[in-house]
Image (spheres, rainbow, N blue to C red):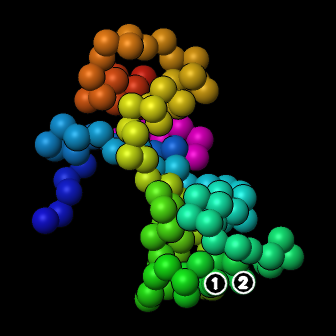
């Protein structure tokens, strides 16, 4: 079943989406891919060599945790693009925590009593 996005916004490396169902999703697409690969590796206890290039690192994670040029490594997704470049993004199980992180970075005042759906919707509106 395809998820339909009602509204979304981008703040730096973060993408916030509100689906038609009202569910809020937060993703972080890392500018520092090698740093993200380190975080992903450490989150699952994967040993890596600090001398690996980003492409080597990404390919080793994909080989260990995925297939077809993509891997789920803990809360991270590692993907090899058609160009051979590697991208990494993170999904957040703790959506409200991710929303607080974004709000704090942009100086957005929020009510701790808001539900995740209220918080996400208001933050998207603020960023839009």
What kind of secondary structure does the magenta stretch mostly adopt? strand
**Is 77 drawn above or below residue 120 in the view shown?**
below
**Which quarter of the rendered picture does the N terminus lie within?**
bottom left
Q: Nearer the viewer, residue 93 or 78?
A: 93
Q: What residue is shown with label 2? A: 56
Residue 34 drawn at (x, y percent): 72, 65
Q: Is residue 24 left or right of residue 39?
A: left
- Residue corresponding to mark 1: 60
Q: Position of residue 63 (x, y in %)?
A: 55, 87
Query: Along the line of sight, which residue is nearer the eye, 88 or 5?
Result: 88
Q: Secondary structure at mark 1?
A: helix
Q: Real-space Cα distance between discs 1 and 2?
A: 6 Å
Residue shown at 49%/79% (left/top)? Answer: 65
Element class at badge 2 = helix
Q: Which residues are magenta?
A: 8-13
Provide residue 17's location: percent of width, then percent of height.
Answer: 33, 43
Mark 1 vs 2: CB contact within 8 A? yes
């Amino acid at each position: 079943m395809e998820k339909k996005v009602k509204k979304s916004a981008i703040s730096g490396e973060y993408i916030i989406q509100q689906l038609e169902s009202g569910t809020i999703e937060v993703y972080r697409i890392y500018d520092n891919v090698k740093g993200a690969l380190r975080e992903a590796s450490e989150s699952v206890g994967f040993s890596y060599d600090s001398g690996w290039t980003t492409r080597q690192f990404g390919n080793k994670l994909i080989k260990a945790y995925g297939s077809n040029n993509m891997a789920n490594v803990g809360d991270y997704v590692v993907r090899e693009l058609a160009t051979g470049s590697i991208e990494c993004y993170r999904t957040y199980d703790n959506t409200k925590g991710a929303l607080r992180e974004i709000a704090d970075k942009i100086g957005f005042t929020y009510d701790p009593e808001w539900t995740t759906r209220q918080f996400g919707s208001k933050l998207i509106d603020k960023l839009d």
